[in-house]
Image (cartoon, grey):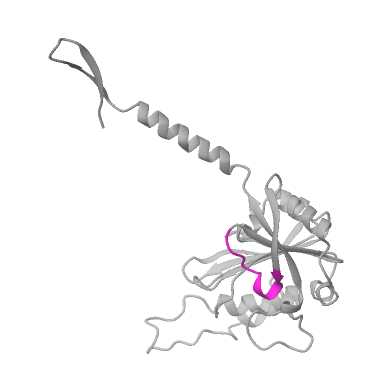
Amino acid sequence: MGAKTALLAYADGDVASALREAGEPAAEATAALIAQVFPGWGMESTKGDVLGESTYPPERLTYAASFPGVDLVCDRRLMFDRPSELPAHLLEAAAGRRVILHAMHSVSDWLAFAVWEEGRLRRSLSLSPDGGIVENIGDPFPFEMPYWAGDRPVEFDPAWDEEPYALPFHPLELGNDALRALFGFLLEGRPLPEDVDPDEVPLLGFELTDPDASRRAQERAALEETARRMQRRSLHRGPDGSWSEAVGG
């Protein structure tokens, strides 16, 4: 499994239904969405892509779309170890709509997802084999039940594994089922006829500029200049009797 996601959705109702009817994203509404999610950041349009290829964008890139009934944003900066600590402005941007966060990374077998309804956190889960269960808030959704009941164990193979898997199930398997249940599509596995085809859902692309990047660069330069000035100075008397200042390391 190699699926990775960094996906945030604001939905009026069922996400899958909205995505099945999705046409071209509304450009102005999508730009306004990005401005809400990343207030104050510089934004420049770039080449878009389809949802199936955009759930984990390259650094500095954001893919997003505003459709009737659902807004989507894909950005690595939306990956939180504790989803319940989602910044307040991201919840405020929902304006009463359902908020869904889904993040997973195949390298570390990490999964996190959360759902807010009417501004209240309903469910948040974050876990990985190395970090264990970092967050487990609220009642599990029906699609989670087979995993917690022990019906989806990771088989132990002594020929390949030194010890049994650290969790009762594989986070990425649950993550894929969470994608289907919460968004209506899969990244891996055999899709069902009713599943959304993520390669048929277009997203717009944006390059974002951190408004604090310039300030931080100036601060680093100032610190380096201060350190240079604070280098040890000493006075030396020359053969002609004059004094000169030398800078030491």
Residue pictured at 45% horizontal, 87% vertical? 156
State the residue in front, 131 or 189: 189
x, y (%) of residue 211? 63, 43
Q: Is residue 99 left or right of residue 242?
A: right
174 to 46, vertically: above or below: below
Q: Examine the rendered structure and indicate whether residue 44 appears above or below residue 235.
A: below
Residue 86 in the image, given as x and y percentages of width and height: 66, 54
Q: Position of residue 149 (x, y in %)?
A: 61, 82
| Quadrant assignment for the N terminus | bottom right
Quadrant of res 24? bottom right
Q: Quadrant of the C terminus?
A: top left
Task: Decide: is 247 above or below 120.
Answer: above
Residue 235: say if magenta: no
Residue 19 occupies quadrant: bottom right
- Out of 71 and 241, give the one closest to the viewer: 241
Q: Position of residue 230 (x, y in %)?
A: 34, 26
Outermost residue, left side: 239
Q: Residue at x 82, y 60 (%)?
A: 97
Residue at the spot 59% in from the left edge and 71% down from the top edge: 4
Which residue is at a point 41% across and 34% down the rendered structure image?
A: 224
Name the side, left or right, on which 243 lies relative to 24: left
Residues in magenta, as a range: 49-59
Kindly give the residue lying farthest to the front in the view shown.
240
State left or right for residue 113 relative to residue 27: left
